[in-house]
Amino acid sequence: MFVIGATKKLQSQIDKTIESTEEYEQIPQIYQWQANIIKVNGRKCLILMNNSTALNLTLFGLESPQFENIDNVIKGSMNQLFQTLGIEESIAEKMLDASQEIVYTKTSSRQTLGLMNEVKSSIEQQTKNKEYKDIDAVTINQKNNRMIFKALEGQTPLYTFQRYFEE
């Protein structure tokens, strides 16, 4: 099961029941995420970040049909992210199996939300002065998962994610 802490902006975009965070505190942090909507070149984008490792995924240019099917959009995009980052297949399968059920709560991790703001700044830098059609989502997602975060003891989200499954 994935537990996604949705910001108010995201809650207003999705037609999902927002559950109580207390009900899902026992779910391991590796299966807990925070999600927010930002705008890039006037288009809605979703940033999803893992509570345990800061592994992150940015989906560009989402429109109403994608928000209506947000669970499937997240699962499919997560699969592509794992392939793009070269995540070991057994780890990817384990995470994708867990994503078969997704529940939404209010946000629950201030630290993760703070790291998401750093990713947002990175996205703004990487898309500055670019036409929307020229934005390379794959490259941006790769770079954002290879950023060094002080909160991760000077490591990258990708390294932290892979190390989590080695331990």
Image (tube, rainbow, N blue to C red):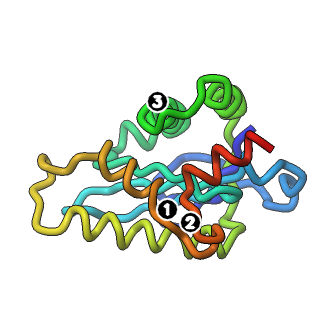
Query: Which residue carries the number 1 mark?
Result: 36
Task: Report whether residue 72 is seen.
Answer: no
Task: Pick the quarter of the image with the C terminus.
Answer: top right
Residue 109 in the image: state x and y as whole percent.
Answer: 69, 69
Q: CA distance from mark 1 to mark 3?
A: 23 Å
Query: Which residue carries the number 2 mark?
Result: 7
Query: Which residue carries the number 3 mark?
Result: 83
- Secondary structure beneath label 3: helix
Q: Residues within 10 Å of mark 3 (few under 14, many from 20)?
A: few
Task: Report whether residue 155 is seen.
Answer: yes
Kindly identify the amino acid type of the residue bearing the numbered disc 2: Thr
Kindly identify which numbered label has been placed on residue 110: none
Direction from residue 161 to residue 15 in the image, left or right: left
- At horizontal 79% and vertical 60% (from top left) the residue drawn is 21
Question: Could you say which is closer to the camera, residue 3 or residue 29?
Answer: 29
Label located before the other in sequence (3 or 2): 2
Determine whether 146 is above or below 114 in the image. Answer: above
- Secondary structure beneath label 2: loop
